[in-house]
Image: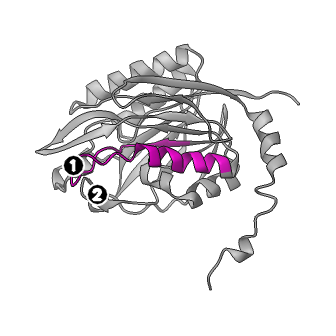
């Protein structure tokens, strides 16, 4: 069998209030990953600024842009073209009167293949996303990029097995999850990073597919609401094993290489897709 090597990377960093500084930091880390051979490089969720959803404030709607005009999408599409890499770009999207938590897929030639809009929108202390975002209307997608077919979910999507399965059924060969998750304002001692990792490791096992998760780190202060993001970005293989991981306070890049042809054979051998019974998965 002809090998199909792919090197993936995840960026973990702390972000502040300056859009330009956040772009420059993320660009530096993407360049580092690309210089070491990464072909698909994932930054965290909404990396262009503070995670503003920790509180409800209409001022943040001013930071939303249409996909073609968003400063991050413009900057990182150009960077993808320069480096010949694929970058899923998380951004706050404005579409007429509608607002979404979205990812634009920049292919290795800098073209935007399309946009995925976050399907599952959380609502709770510290994560008041329903105030800002509508539930996504794109459905779950798989993107045929220059370096392989990928699926991208966004943060809260990563807890739902249906999201991972749908992307795998559409042909995704690696799943990517940009994330912003950390402390809970009502319980600063609550640390869910192990559950967070295990949920996605389970997706890897049941779909025989590698998973890449990029989280932010650091303490953020959003007009008096403090939130510490717990890092622990990771890459797991198609058997669910953690093959690369960062700690809670680390800033940097994770990288790992896979043989997609080998994984394809492994997936067929296990028979998860052969033995599905979708006609039984309904409650009419």
Q: Is residue 228 left or right of residue 195?
A: left
Closer to the camera in the image, 211 or 15: 211
Q: Quadrant of residue 169?
A: bottom right
Identify the secondary structure beneath mark 1: helix
Where is mark 1, residue-wise?
A: 60
Identify the magenta region. 176-205
Density class for disc 1 (Cα within 10 Å; few <14, some 14-19, many ≥20) is few
Quick check: is 182 in the magenta stretch? Answer: yes
Q: Residue 142's spot in the image, x, y percent?
A: 63, 49
> Looking at the image, is 283 positioned above or below residue 187?
below
> Looking at the image, is 89 positioned above or below residue 92?
above
Closer to the camera in the image, 86 or 190: 190
Identify the secondary structure beneath mark 2: loop
> Looking at the image, is 68 positioned above or below residue 96?
above
Outermost residue toward the front in this view: 189
Outermost residue toward the left in this view: 224
Where is mark 2, residue-wise?
A: 132
């Amino acid at each position: 069998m002809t090998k199909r090597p792919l090197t993936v990377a995840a960026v973990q960093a702390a972000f502040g209030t300056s859009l330009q500084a956040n772009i420059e930091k993320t660009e530096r880390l993407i360049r580092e990953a690309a210089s070491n051979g990464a072909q698909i490089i994932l930054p965290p969720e909404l990396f262009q600024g503070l995670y503003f959803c920790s509180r409800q404030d209409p001022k943040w709607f001013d930071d939303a842009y249409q996909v073609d005009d968003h400063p991050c999408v413009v900057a990182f599409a150009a960077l993808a073209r320069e480096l010949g890499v694929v970058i899923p770009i998380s951004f706050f999207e404005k579409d007429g009167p509608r607002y979404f938590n979205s990812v634009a897929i920049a292919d290795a030639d800098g073209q935007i293949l399309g946009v995925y809009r976050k399907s599952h929108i959380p609502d709770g202390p510290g994560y008041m996303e329903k105030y800002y975002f509508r539930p996504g209307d794109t459905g779950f997608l798989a993107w045929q990029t220059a370096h392989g077919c990928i699926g991208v979910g966004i943060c809260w999507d990563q807890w739902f097995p249906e999201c991972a399965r749908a992307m795998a059924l559409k042909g995704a060969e690696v799943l990517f999850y940009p994330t912003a998750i950390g402390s809970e304002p009502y319980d600063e001692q609550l640390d869910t990073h192990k559950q967070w990792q295990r949920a996605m490791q389970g997706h890897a096992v049941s779909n025989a597919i590698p998973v890449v998760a990029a989280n932010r780190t650091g303490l953020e202060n959003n007009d008096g609401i403090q939130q510490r993001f717990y890092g622990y970005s990771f890459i797991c293989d198609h058997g669910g094993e953690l093959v690369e991981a960062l700690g809670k306070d680390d800033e940097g890049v994770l990288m790992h290489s896979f043989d997609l042809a080998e994984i394809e054979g492994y997936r067929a051998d296990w028979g998860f897709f052969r033995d599905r019974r979708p006609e039984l998965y309904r409650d009419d």
